[in-house]
Amino acid sequence: MLRFHLAEDTIDQKDIDRLIEWLKGTPRLTKDKLNVLFENQWSRWIGRKFSAFCNSGSSANLLMYYALLLSGKLKNKKVIVPATGWVTTIAPAIQFGFEPILCESDPDTFGLNLDHLEKLLKKHEPSAVTMVQVLGIPHKMNAVMALKKKYRFILLEDACASIGSTFFGRKIGTFGDMSSFSFYFGHQMSTIEGGMVSTDNPLFRDLLLMLRSHGWSKDLDPVSHQKLVKKYRVNDDHKPFVFYEPGLNLRSTDLNAFLGLRQLEKLEWMISRRHANHLRYQKHLGERFRIQQCKDPDATLSSISFCMLAKNSVERHSLAAALTKNGIETRLFTAGNLGRHPFWFNRYGKPDFPVADQLYQCGIFLPNNPALDAQGVDFISKIVLEASCRKKSS
Ligand SMILES: Cc1ncc(COP(=O)(O)O)c(C=O)c1O
């Protein structure tokens, strides 16, 4: 029987009770006013001008790439993508016919490797770079932003697993020209399924809102909507149902937005629990194992799972066995090198990335969630340390 899960639902009984009360009022369930309210409150919380709520973090990434494609801002279709992240950090680049160029991982944060990134920027002069803020540990954003300024690329920031982390006081998810977030179960907050894209750019905002919903203009503010009506000389009868772009339907519902609004009320508390657990794991395991390192000593580390590296895959196997035996759920970091997955190597071949390979072969996750307390972290760390000693002496 599992005593410690990697993730626990952040939608608790109180949230369910409030949802039931709300449903009794027979509200509109499809996308309506609560979506807009959630988007506005999210924008305020994260510190960006605009946000578009959608049905998953993967859809948020899809929307970012699609808005980028139609923005008229591309000098070519090259985009640098990270070796460490998630399949849907990269998949839309393939789906929309970009030329994705894989970048090695950073040995400290596991984000983009900055030396390799600069080499790729010089060689390919890409229009865009997609980065992942890995597992809630902020990347070296001063250096990333300096490269952005020097090489003038558009930055897509996948912060799907890093809600609430900060780097020198600035929230993760506010660095990209567009930034994505996931509200899936087990992430820092949940709307069951859900995602968000945030931006300060009104062109991206309008494209995101149109592409999310069939390519029509119904979600735009009246000024943007009217511009399109005028540009295409749309008559009054046709106005609401003109398809300006070949859109998708990636909308969420007001039911999910209701949950999102309630999650925002306790988000700071949930982040502080993750941060405290992460620091405690660091204290217990940081000397024995390689773990993620953040350059900002005062950063908020809203970690989604605690990631550590075993010495090799044999040690990782025995750590995983000891954890499972003691009722502790664990997971290998198989997305540590996306280049090792068929979706990538069948198209582009196998990359030779020592850091990402090590994450793929030796990375292992320990539970972190707001329900986990200091005692739990102490117990899990003890099991890891004992298993590691046993391995050494055997
Ligand atoms: C970095 C990253 N990007 C994107 C996603 C996709 O989010 P979702 O599961 O909401 O589609 C995930 C999911 O864990 C992720 O970790």
Image: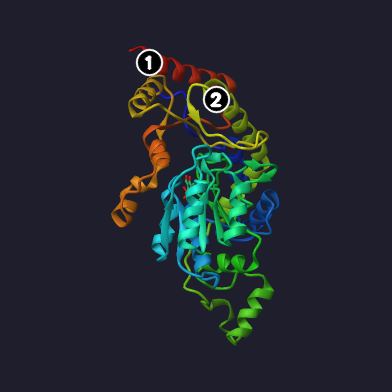
Q: CA distance from mark 1 to mark 2?
A: 21 Å
Foreground residue among 394 and 113: 113
Q: Is residue 299 above or below residue 327?
A: below
Please state the horizontal and vertical placement of residue 264, each as a whole percent of the image: 65, 44
Three-letter amino acid code of the residue under disc 1? Lys
Furthest toward the top, the residue is 393
Q: Quadrant of the N terminus?
A: top left
Q: Relative to 215, is 385 above or below?
A: above
First of labels 1, 2 by sequence position = 2
Where is residue 10 shown, x and y percent of the image? 56, 37
What residue is rendered at 31% in x and 51% in y?
Answer: 345
Q: Nearer the viewer, mark 1 or mark 2?
A: 1
Please name the amino acid that badge 2 sits on.
Tyr
Q: Is residue 278 above or below residue 47?
A: above
Q: Secondary structure at mark 2?
A: helix
Label 1 CB less than 8 angstroms from ligand 1: no
Name the foreground residue: 71 vs 253: 71
Is the distance from the Cβ of mark 2 to the nearest ligand 1 atom less than 8 Å?
no
Location of mark 2 (residue): 281
Q: Quadrant of the C terminus?
A: top left
Residue 50 seen in the current view: yes
Residue 5 horizontal/vertical position (percent): 47, 29
Q: How is the image coloured?
A: rainbow
The crowd level at tag 1 (other Cα within 10 Å; few <14, some 14-19, many 20+) is few
Q: Which mark is residue 141?
A: none
Residue 333, visible in the rendered structure: no
| Disc 1 and disc 2 in contact, CB within 8 angstroms | no
Question: Which element type, helix, strand or loop, lies under badge 1?
Answer: helix
Furthest residue toward left = 346
Q: Position of residue 310 (x, y in %)?
A: 41, 27
Q: Which residue is mark 1?
A: 392
Q: Quick one: label 2, few (<14), some, or many (20+) residues within 10 Å? A: many
